[in-house]
Amino acid sequence: MTDFQLVIDCADPERQVRFWAGALGYRPEAPPGGAATWRAYWLSTGVPEDELGDGDCCDSIVDPAGAGPRIWFQQVPEGKKVKNRLHLDVRAGGKREEVPLPARRQRVDARVERLIAAGASSPRVLSQPGLDHYAVTLLDPEGNEFCVN
């Protein structure tokens, strides 16, 4: 297996860390090497101050169980302009072969409500009569598409 992290370009890493940590059950990653803050860590490695954001918050989240990939929110100057070519699926409904569609729909809708309260927007339901699938597409606080299914 190859070790990898997921990198998401954004304008405000601190806001994305808060949103996605809550959405995925991840936690903000502590700075390495005993550094007091991520800013202090990056400065100690030689990153120029003008390349760092304004805050001391971390810019990455990790799975507390260690099973999922590290997610780094990389601050970039340009805004999002087109549809994502890669998106996250938040699997809240359960497996199709284990959970009936009405229960999956209820679980998805409950998670969608919490995500909207946390800053997601623009819900669009993906469902068709006769199809054993239910999902909702949302936008995170910076307009990146993701699905809850």
Image (cartoon, grey):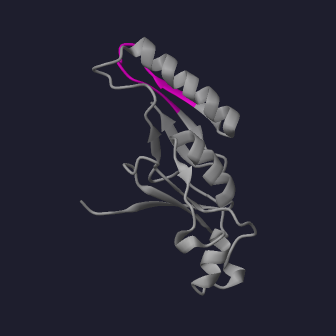
Residue 45, percent from left and from top:
57, 84
In the image, farthest residue toward the left? 1
Q: What residue is rendered at 49% in x and 21% in y? A: 107
Residue 5, percent from left and from top:
42, 61
Q: What residue is rendered at 45% in x and 58% in y? A: 70
**The stretch drawn in magenta includes residue 131:** yes
Total labels: the figure holds 0
Of 146 and 24, the residue lying toward us = 24
Of 122 and 64, the residue lying toward us = 64
Depicted 73 relative to depicted 34: above or below: above
Q: Is residue 78 left or right of residue 33?
A: right
> Which quadrant of the rendered structure holds the N terminus?
bottom left
In the image, farthest residue toward the right? 54
Q: Which residues are magenta?
A: 124-136
**The stretch drawn in magenta includes residue 50:** no
Of 29 and 11, the residue lying toward us = 29
Q: Is residue 54 left or right of residue 103?
A: right
Q: Is residue 33 left or right of residue 142?
A: left
Depicted 87 relative to depicted 76: above or below: above
> Which quadrant of the rendered structure holds the C terminus?
top left
Quadrant in the rendering for residue 134 = top left
Of 6 and 131, the residue lying toward us = 6
Q: What residue is rendered at 52% in x and 47% in y? A: 26
Residue 41, percent from left and from top:
61, 76
Residue 76, percent from left and from top:
63, 69
Quadrant in the rendering for residue 123 = top right
Quadrant in the rendering for residue 117 = top right
